[in-house]
Amino acid sequence: MVHSARRSFHNSIGDAPHHLVEQWIATPATDDSRRLALSGDSDSLDWNSVQVPGEWRSNEAFADHAGGVLYRTTFDHVMPTTDQRLWITCDGIFDQADIWLDGAYIGDQDDYFLRHAYDVTALSRLDTTHSLIIEVNGSHHAGIWRPIEVITTGLVGIESTRILCRDATDARAHLRLHAVLDSSVSCMTTVRTSINDVVLSQKNHSLSPGSNEIAWTIDIDQPALWFPWGLGDQPLCTVLIEVLIDGVISDSYTVLTGLREVSMADWVLHVNGERMYTKGAYLEMPDCDMGTVSDQDIAHPIVLAHELGLNLVRMHDHVAHPAIYETADALGMMIWQDIPHRPTGKRGRRVASRWADGLVATLGHHPSVALWHHKAFDKWTQSHLRKVDVTRPIVAHASTAVPLGLFNHDRAKPVRQFLSGIGHDLTTSIAVIPNIARFPTHEQWHVVHVDANEAVTDPISIRRDIEALRRVKYSPAGGFCFPGLLDSSTLSDGGVLDSAASPKPSYFALQDACRPVIVVADQLPSVLQPGDAISFDVHVVSDVHHELVDARVIATLTWSGGQQHHEWTGDIARDACVFIGHVDSVTPTTVGSLILSLLVEAGEHTSSNRYVCTIVA
């Protein structure tokens, strides 16, 4: 059975879960090694000590290994009583695994991001010493990357849960809960649900042997709402689900969640009724040993994205480490969650159903997870996602103007050819094809720019593009997802952060362009001649959700031997792009640089901007 997320189990014998983290050994998986290991005659095999959790490439003996690996450990455990059950739980294994206990096959898995649990009650009653063998097959990150535990429950175990916040206002939040209870007998149970240690629901259910699905709802009065940063605070509440038989806890599940409502209309996200301009970036699967990396290190990109002024990250083609989602919940970062690629055909349809259920069970309680994304052709995944999660938007492609799926990249060619005739400039492209600005991802950056690498590494290009997108916020832009956050980005090997997460000059350009309040002007020609007319509009873009009173905006044209000054004062509307003023001037006769300096002062929100032109004779 598949369990959701991090959970705390009730243990009916009073002991903590048994973490199998020591005395693991491993050997390359072959027909002979598998036969010898399972028969108990494995002394002739070349075993090596390995770390679990950990990827096998981190062990010297397997650094260059290709193929499968047999992991083995032995452990002692008290035999369960007649009213107890024993489980082997696997939080995550890359990529595919087969599992044996004491030579008996107990199950397999091929989804690295889901927790699986295997009922080994019958086997555990044969002896107190056990041998666990796991054959892992995979590629780059292969290995047991999350803990392996031995868990004791009562006769009813919680197989899976879904905890979703359907709607939330200041007056009431509505939670939808779903659970699959695995029972070894026919019995009557009580399912008790508490929020922050207050019991809000207690219902009786008659169970049959095997899996039993139950669903219920909870209303929470006057909830503390969770908001993305910049819109409000990020309070979390503890949800505790307990299954009781005759008043005794058989199993329990504990998780943190946030109460919020999220929706999307015309690519504009709304959280608790507040619209937000989305400033996002891609986050790839990190090239590190996710079994041994610390929570702080693995979540560091989320912290850096927050410091950049971004409010969303896209988990590109992967499900991330649990610490990523926990950090996003705490910081108020939103997450665009991609669905990993799955097989095609009939098997792919079965996988789509299992993955949809498992992903919602694993990630659904995180308030930071704002939307699901899958490829446009993958109707099975979309169907199952809509069935199990009605609380989040689902998008079928990551491009608003040129829908690109796995098999239709040729759609971009005519658009690229057309845009090449107008100079491959994002500002000009938006004027010609407004929908390019609705929610640009790496596909738009790739289509608009001739040199995609330069588009995500050049400070001037980055700032110009982000300012162009923010200037048309909500008309039609709902936001953007910048492709070049880390050096392992989708678009190229160039990001604003290097492989060690150290800032490059482009980092500071992106940070300046993503400030809550910025001042921008029409792009001036790069080259001017004396006497040329200069004409530009000045705008202030505010993502702050309150009015900025008595703001001051200054525009200064400076050249060798002269200066021209313009100043405006007034209020800046909340969450809007506001026209400040228009400037007409004439290029001076002095050859050299002409610099347009902009400054906005609005209380704590002060930012500047700068444009440079060259005056030639």
Image: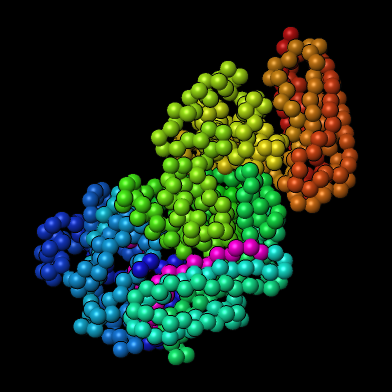
Indicate whether 226 appears above or below 599: below
Q: Residue at x 63, y 59 (%)?
A: 261
Q: Can you give x and y, in whole percent of width and height, for residue 571 in the image?
A: 86, 44
Pick the quarter of the image with the C terminus.
top right
Q: Residue at x 59, y 82 (%)?
A: 199
Instruction: Specify whether 296 is left or right of 551.
Output: left
Pick the quarter of the image with the N terminus.
bottom left
Q: How is the structure coloured here?
A: rainbow
Residue 146 falls within the magenta-colored stretch: yes
Q: Can you give x and y, in whole percent of width and height, for residue 568 in the image?
A: 88, 36
Residue 112 falls within the magenta-colored stretch: no
Range covered by the magenta-colored residues: 143-168
Q: Can you give x and y, in whole percent of width and height, for residue 301 in the image?
A: 53, 51
Q: Residue at x 53, y 32 (%)?
A: 402
Residue 582, quarter of the rendered image: top right
Q: Residue at x 12, y 63 (%)?
A: 35
Residue 271, quarter of the rendered image: bottom right
Q: Can you give x and y, in whole percent of width and height, for residue 481 in the image?
A: 57, 42
- Decide which of 68, 392 is in the foreground and name it: 392
Residue most extreme to the top: 617
Residue 496 visible in image: no
- Decide which of 525, 215 is in the foreground and name it: 215
Mostly what secondary structure, the magenta segment? Answer: strand
Count how many numbered circles sit on residues in the image: 0
Residue 587, quarter of the rendered image: top right
- Decide which of 578, 586 is in the foreground and name it: 578
Residue 370 visible in image: yes
